[in-house]
Amino acid sequence: MKNGKLTLVLGGTRSGKSSFAEKLAQGLGERVLYVATATVHDEEMAARVTQHQERRPVSWFTVEEAKEVATVLEKYSEAYDVILIDCLTLWLSNLLLDDSKYPASTWREKEALILLEVEKLASICRDLSASVIIVSSEVGLGIVPDTSLGRQFRDLAGAANQKFAQYANEVYLVLAGLPIELKALALADQKV
């Protein structure tokens, strides 16, 4: 029986999106599963991960999974009230750079394969009995990346954010630490 809801939390770098998502998770239930998709390749990223770890309540259970997020959800979801996935765009980066799992010969083929994974994950998140909060970066508001890979990532992230927004019950955009609930605004605007 579906009781949970799917919430997408978008924002730019250091916008406060993760902190806001963590506060939402605390309000939705006591048993929280935190799915971390970051991979650490340098000291700066290690410091970011440490900051996130120190901010989380010790009662939360954390699973670090860079690529197989759907498998984690299928394995653990029944034991938790809330699942917080941080973040969608890091997960997309991991998939985008994985040529062994996505050995497509063209960018369009690879994009299509990854977007199938996005659709699968969004569907799973929507259908769980636990409430799911997924954090994602809004990367399309800045300058156009000067590399092909950068533009591919930006386009992939935009398409993935749109897909999750379609599936989500709530969609927040966090700017300067201030959350704005977008889906309710969009639906209210359609009624006018």
Image: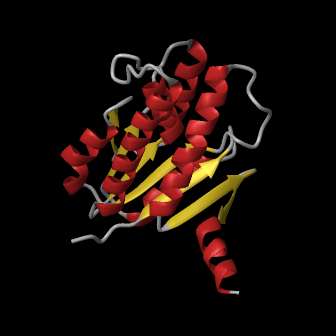
Q: Residue placed farthest to the top in the image?
A: 42
Regarding residue 2, the answer to whether it shows in the image is yes
- Residue shown at the point (61%, 18%) measured from the top left: 44
Q: Going by the image, does 141 lie left or right of 40?
A: right
Q: Quick one: 33 or 37, which is closer to the camera?
A: 37
- Residue shown at the point (63%, 35%) measured from the top left: 154
Q: Position of residue 188 (x, y in %)?
A: 65, 81
Q: Position of residue 67 (x, y in %)?
A: 36, 30
Which quadrant of the figure has residue 184? bottom right
Q: Quick one: 121 or 51, which is closer to the camera?
A: 121
Q: The C terminus is located in which quarter?
A: bottom right
Q: Quick one: 75 or 185, which is closer to the camera?
A: 185
Q: Position of residue 17 (x, y in %)?
A: 61, 49
- Residue shown at the point (39%, 29%) measured from the top left: 66
In the image, residue 44 above or below residue 19? above
Regarding residue 18, the answer to whether it shows in the image is no
Q: The N terminus is located in which quarter?
A: bottom left
Q: Quick one: 42 or 53, which is closer to the camera?
A: 42
Q: Residue placed farthest to the bottom in the image?
A: 192
In the image, residue 112 above or below residue 48? below
Which quadrant of the figure has residue 127? bottom left
- Residue shown at the point (65%, 48%) measured from the top left: 11
In the image, residue 67 above or below residue 123? above
Q: Position of residue 92 (x, y in %)?
A: 48, 33
The total number of labels drawn is: 0
Which quadrant of the figure has residue 102? top left
